[in-house]
Structures are given as structure tokens and as C-alpha cells.
Image (cartoon, helix red, strand yellow):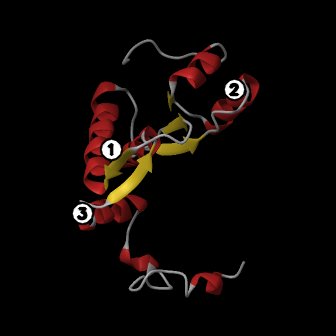
């Protein structure tokens, strides 16, 4: 599909091209969107909607927790393994705001696939939903500190 396909499908006022020089990072895009659209819905799932203000607040809280309650340093990799839940964008943007590198991983992976991805990526920690964690914890050591 060619990019021009979308030109007449965007809402009025949405440009066809993005000025890549207007932002220094993905986090700057995120923070500007949260400020500009604070009261608008950012994500909805299972009857619950997070506004951009909610997403900003929750991701900032998760970023602060990662920075002050773990030994993770900017540049470290964190594997995020969740189904399509509202916690997923909170975890991703929180990790990015903490200066971490996000390693997306599929919660449907087998334990063997998870082990390989975690080892290959060099992920130092992992954020997940409970069912995935139970499967994976048998194959990947989880630090007991900072929980």
C-alpha cells in the first residue's frame, strides 16, 4: 500500500507528512500529545478509557518506580510481555520515560521462545501479566529483590 493511499483518509487538519525534525525523541512526541490532548481518550479497553492525562500520570509513576525501586539504569533493556491491556502502554511509556530500552515480547510465546528472546535481547528485567509470568519464571530467573 502506498503512503498516498492515506492522504484523503486523515481527519481535517492532520498533515500528510510529519516533520521529523520537530521532535528529539519518541518521549517528546508522547509528552506533547499528553499535554495537547490531556482530556481526550488515549486508549480504551474492556469498558475502561484512559485519557492522555491518565496515561501521562500512570506512566510517570511507573517510570519513577523503575528509577527509584530497581537497579535499572538508562540504556538497560526491559522486556515487556503483556496482552492487549491498558497496562501495556503505561508500561511501555513508563519504561521509555525512565530511559530504558523496551524489548517487546509476545505473551503467546512458549517458554523456550521466551528464554531465547530474553537471552538474545539482553533484557535485565521483565514486566508482564501474571499468567505469562508463571510460565516464564520456570525458565528465566527472576530477581527476588526490588519486588
Q: Is residue 95 visible?
A: yes
Sequence-first tag of 2 and 3: 3
Q: Position of residue 69 (x, y in %)?
A: 30, 25
The residue sitting at 54% across, 42% down in the picture is 84
The residue sitting at 72% across, 77% down in the picture is 1
SS category of the residue bearing label 2:
helix
Which tag is nearer the camera, tag 2 or tag 3? 3
Which residue occupies the foreground of this view, 85 or 80?
A: 85
Which tag is nearer the camera, tag 1 or tag 2? 1
Distance CA(mark 2)–CA(mark 3): 38 Å
Question: Mark 2 — residue?
Answer: 115
SS category of the residue bearing label 1:
helix
Q: From what the image shows, is residue 20 above or below residue 138? A: below
Question: Mark 1 — residue?
Answer: 59
SS category of the residue bearing label 3:
helix
Q: Taking 111 as reference, is 77 left or right?
A: left
Distance CA(mark 1)–CA(mark 3): 14 Å
The residue sitting at 36% across, 18% down in the picture is 146
Q: How many marks?
A: 3
Question: Mark 3 — residue?
Answer: 35
Sequence-first tag of 1 and 3: 3
Which residue occupies the foreground of this view, 141 or 81?
A: 81
Q: Position of residue 60 (x, y in %)?
A: 28, 44
Q: For residue 145, which quarter of the picture?
A: top left
Q: Do residues under tags 2 and 3 come within 8 Å of each other at their CB atoms? A: no
Which image quarter holds the C terminus?
top left
Amino acid at each position: 500500500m502506498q503512503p498516498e493511499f492515506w492522504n484523503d483518509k486523515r481527519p481535517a487538519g492532520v498533515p500528510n507528512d510529519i516533520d521529523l525534525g520537530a521532535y528529539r525523541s519518541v518521549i517528546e512526541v508522547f509528552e506533547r500529545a499528553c499535554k495537547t490532548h490531556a482530556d481526550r481518550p488515549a486508549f480504551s479497553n474492556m469498558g475502561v478509557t484512559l485519557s492522555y492525562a491518565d496515561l501521562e500520570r500512570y506512566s510517570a509513576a511507573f517510570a519513577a518506580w523503575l528509577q527509584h525501586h530497581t537497579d535499572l539504569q538508562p540504556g538497560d533493556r526491559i522486556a515487556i510481555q503483556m496482552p492487549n491491556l491498558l497496562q501495556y502502554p503505561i508500561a511501555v511509556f513508563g519504561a521509555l520515560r525512565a530511559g530504558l530500552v523496551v524489548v517487546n515480547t509476545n505473551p503467546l510465546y512458549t517458554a523456550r521462545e521466551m528464554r531465547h528472546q530474553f537471552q538474545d535481547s539482553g533484557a535485565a528485567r521483565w514486566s508482564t501479566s501474571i499468567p505469562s509470568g508463571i510460565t516464564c519464571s520456570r525458565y528465566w530467573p527472576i530477581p527476588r529483590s526490588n519486588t
